[in-house]
Image (cartoon, coloured by chain):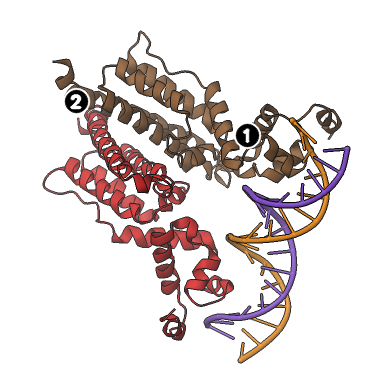
Chain colours: A red, B brown, C purple, D orange
Amino acid sequence: MATSAARRQEPLSRQRVVAASMELARERGLDGVTMRALAAELDVTPMAVYYHVRNKDELVALVAESVLEDASPLSLADAGWETALRDHLLALWETLAKYPGLSSYMINLPTLGTTESSYAKGARFFEEAGFPPRLAKLAWSFALTFIHGRLSVDAKLDRSAARAAGLDTIAAREHVVFGVDAIIAGLKGMLGEGSDADHA
Amino acid sequence: MATSAARRQEPLSRQRVVAASMELARERGLDGVTMRALAAELDVTPMAVYYHVRNKDELVALVAESVLEDASPLSLADAGWETALRDHLLALWETLAKYPGLSSYMINLPTLGTTESSYAKGARFFEEAGFPPRLAKLAWSFALTFIHGRLSVDAKLDRSAARAAGLDTIAAREHVVFGVDAIIAGLKGMLGEGSDADHA
DNA sequence: ACCTGAACACCGTTCAAGT
DNA sequence: ACCTGAACACCGTTCAAGT
């Protein structure tokens, strides 16, 4: 209210639209990011947004891209791919958890809401870890699918009665940690079998 | 069209509402199951449906329950829990794949769209396989999350250009098979470590 | 180039009324 | 008990028009 006059001064831009969308997503969840609510936040008509963004799908894709940039990059460390992957997936989970409903949307997209280059980067990580190209892609998709799946399960949960209860968010973390550890153990097993043909 | 007169004869019932919803979900995906489309299919006013079902959430929950009943039950076979789990998860994937968008909905529910009793049955399977109670619940949730996650990734995909291409459905199966194998390998690893304390 | 205003085609759902 | 009709409060989006 106090800043609405100031906000009106600066011209609308793609960046401001995305930034406002992220703020809305954090506070009300992605369901709260409607074109009308977004426009109100920007002190503008709903249709003004369409000048900077083709449609809502493109907008959410931009939001997803922007959120992922804030997450820690996945890169092979000295400690080995297992701990690097573990740290990255848990950090990714924590970052995305701040935007309720975003994963529910991303999991419905072909490349799980990532850009192609970012998706390829994940696959490269597994190649460097010793996975043959095809398995590397499958492994990365496998890990991402679980993380987004888990976030989807929690998304609608903490909006209702669970947030008041308090202990369900602890349970949520247990689920992720268990899943990530199981994923790593599983991929380790797949690497032992699958890479023989390539590393002989 | 030809059967609309006949359909009008039989009184509307909860069963008929659910059955028609399932048919619509198979043909047009869950997005096509609107109260209005459903009512049209039943030769009835949209509000007539509300007499037999509280709201759309309850309706979809009933559809999910009904679809899961058609899937093969998860039970420990002679061949060991690994193959039993593998067969069940792949069969579950195939069944749910017939209802595009259903998993995208189920993955947003607390118990992943299953009834509590059906959820407990999955956990019991892992207990019988040798997992301690807490790990058994986590393991079942882990497996279900991936299956629904994978189906969500494919849901929007085969609706657009991918179905025409034809080879993306093959890729989809590869992803599931890889994931299921990795899950089993991972859980096998977790069982080796985690069960020591309980089986000593 | 950038934004507004009015309107369209959808949703799920409530409420009062009919039989 | 079972269903209809009209209406409400939302969506995303198109289209023509303003500056």
Residue at image coords 61%, 40%: B29
Residue at image coords 33%, 50%: A120
Give the x, y percent position of residue A198.
Answer: 24, 33
Direction from residue A115 to residue A182 in the image, left or right: left
Q: Give the label on residue A163, or none.
A: none
Q: Are marks 1 and 2 in contact (CB under 8 Å)?
A: no
Direction from residue B3 to residue B198 in the image, left or right: left
Residue at image coords 60%, 36%: B59
* Residue B98 in view in this figure: no
Q: For the residue carrying disc 2, how many other residues have a C-alpha within 10 Å: few (<14), some (14-19), or many (20+)?
A: some
Q: Amino acid at mark 2?
A: Gly
Direction from residue B189 to residue B145 in the image, left or right: right
Q: Amino acid at mark 1?
A: Arg
* Residue A98 in view in this figure: yes
Q: Nearer the viewer, residue A162 or B173?
A: A162
In the image, is residue A48 above or below residue C18?
below
Residue beneath label 2, please?
B194
Tell me the chain of label 1: B
Residue beneath label 1, please?
B26
In the image, is residue B136 above or below residue B153?
above
Calculate the distance from the C-alpha at mark 1 to the C-alpha at mark 2. Answer: 41 Å
Give the x, y percent position of residue B199.
Answer: 17, 16
Tell me the chain of label 2: B
Q: Secondary structure at mark 1?
A: helix
Direction from residue B130 to residue A157 in the image, left or right: right
Give the x, y percent position of residue B184.
Answer: 31, 25
Q: Nearer the viewer, residue B161 or B43?
A: B43
Report which quarter residue B4 is drawn in.
Answer: top right
Q: Nearer the viewer, residue B101 or B171?
A: B101
